[in-house]
Image: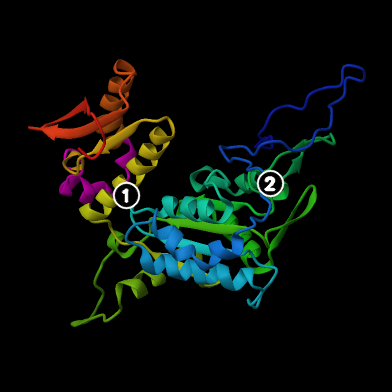
């Protein structure tokens, strides 16, 4: 079988010598974004003290998970942990699709670093083969001194305070799990450019593995198991990833399904962020509560949680609102409400009318 060629662009050649030109690693591959270096914020102490309060503004129905993550980060940032070389925090988020696992990681990034763009997102479905692990690391193009950037180590080397999100950990090859265990236990890995330290990073991994995907009640003879749902879930995770990896996370957080009221609160938060941007453009928008009833349905929430909420908001609210804003450029105060079964938008003399 021919030897697999490394992925990435071919090295550029030097016109004078006809040889590959060495270059520094640039952006990470496979969709991973290299965040800008983030200096510690002046109000970081205040943020850490109020972290639960800040996260609850964006994360709905996950108060216990918020408290556990906040406590773990505060312990690490005040140097009270037993393993200072390990990441600032490592959290495994467990639950079905649409319950807010990815949103949770982005909310922590926004709270800690001031914006949620400082997240290195890696889809573990891209690392299903053992040789795929090389794509996570900086490597050398064969026969040259040209570096091929790594989708994990390049962003962390460029910004040691990166927040890393590994989506769908169950899809990754066991070799990736072993590398992750090394990071969580030692805090460093080595690639072609040398050591990469993860001691300032926050790492989140998500998985859809949960007891609902297997038998929810175990039976031994005629006696039912007394294991709790959380215990059954942990047993499933240890069987899939190994007990060492599960134990290496600071916290394993179990996300239950969202209720329609949870999704409604999330929708209000998202809409309010847009309304605040419009206020800065001297436009006020007032939205009736009944508007949310047009697209937040109990059966849809039970099926998909908040997974399609952004699309639903775009189709049912922002599309008609965008047309209205373009057609009524002079309107400063706008009301969005429901008449019959359709959303109607009209200008108002003043807000709060």
Q: Where the N terminus falls, by quadrant? A: top right
**Secondary structure found at label 1:** helix
Quadrant of the rendered image containing residue 200 = bottom right
Left or right of 55, for residue 20: right
Q: Where the C terminus falls, by quadrant? A: top left
Q: Pick whichever, 80 or 12, lies toward us.
A: 80
Q: Position of residue 89 (x, y in %)?
A: 57, 65
Residue, far left: 340
Residue 26 position (above or below residue 300) = above
Residue that mark 1 sits on: 266
Residue 129 position (above or below residue 274) = below
Q: Pick whichever, 321 or 72, lies toward us.
A: 321
Left or right of 235, for residue 328: left
Residue that mark 2 sits on: 37
Q: Position of residue 291 (x, y in %)?
A: 19, 38
- Residue 337 within the magenta-colored segment of the rendering: no
Residue 41 position (above or below residue 310) = below
Callout 1: 10 Å neighbours few (<14), some, many (20+)? Answer: many
Q: Which residues are magenta?
A: 293-311
Residue 183 position (above or below residue 271) = below
Residue in view at x 71 percent, y 36 percent: 26
Tag 2 or tag 1, which sits nearer the N-term? 2
Residue in view at x 92 percent, y 17 percent: 16
From where the camera sits, is residue 138 visible? Answer: yes
């Amino acid at each position: 079988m021919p030897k697999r060629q490394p992925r990435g662009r071919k090295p550029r050649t030097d016109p004078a010598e006809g040889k590959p030109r060495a270059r520094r690693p640039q952006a990470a591959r496979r969709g991973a974004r290299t965040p800008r270096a983030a200096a510690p914020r002046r109000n970081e102490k205040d943020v850490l003290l109020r972290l639960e309060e800040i996260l609850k503004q964006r994360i709905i129905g996950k108060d216990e998970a918020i408290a556990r993550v906040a406590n773990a980060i505060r312990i690490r940032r005040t140097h009270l942990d037993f393993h200072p070389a390990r990441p600032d925090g490592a959290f495994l988020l467990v639950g079905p699709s649409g319950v807010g696992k990815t949103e949770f990681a982005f909310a922590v990034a926004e709270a800690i670093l001031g914006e949620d763009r400082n997240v290195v997102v890696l889809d573990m479905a891209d690392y299903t083969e053992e040789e795929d692990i090389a794509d996570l690391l900086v490597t050398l193009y064969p026969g040259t001194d040209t570096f091929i950037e790594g989708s994990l180590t390049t962003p962390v080397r460029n910004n040691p305070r990166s927040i890393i999100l590994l989506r769908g950990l169950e899809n990754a090859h066991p070799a990736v799990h072993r590398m992750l265990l090394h990071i969580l236990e030692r805090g460093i890995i080595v690639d072609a450019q040398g050591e990469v330290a993860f001691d300032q990073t926050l790492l989140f991994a998500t998985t859809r593995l949960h007891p609902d995907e297997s038998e929810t009640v175990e039976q031994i003879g005629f006696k039912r198991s007394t294991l709790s749902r959380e215990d059954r879930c942990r047993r499933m995770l240890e069987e899939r990833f190994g007990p060492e990896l599960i134990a290496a996370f600071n916290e394993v957080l179990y996300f239950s399904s969202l209720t329609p009221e949870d999704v409604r609160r999330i929708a209000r938060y998202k809409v309010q962020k847009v309304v605040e941007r419009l206020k800065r453009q001297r436009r006020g928008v007032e939205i009736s509560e009944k508007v949310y009833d047009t697209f937040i349905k109990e059966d849809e929430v039970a099926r998909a949680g908040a997974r399609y909420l952004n699309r639903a908001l775009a189709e049912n609210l922002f599309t008609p609102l965008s047309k209205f804003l373009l057609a009524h450029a002079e309107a400063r105060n706008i009301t969005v409400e429901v008449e019959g079964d359709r959303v109607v938008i009209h200008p108002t003399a003043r807000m709060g009318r």
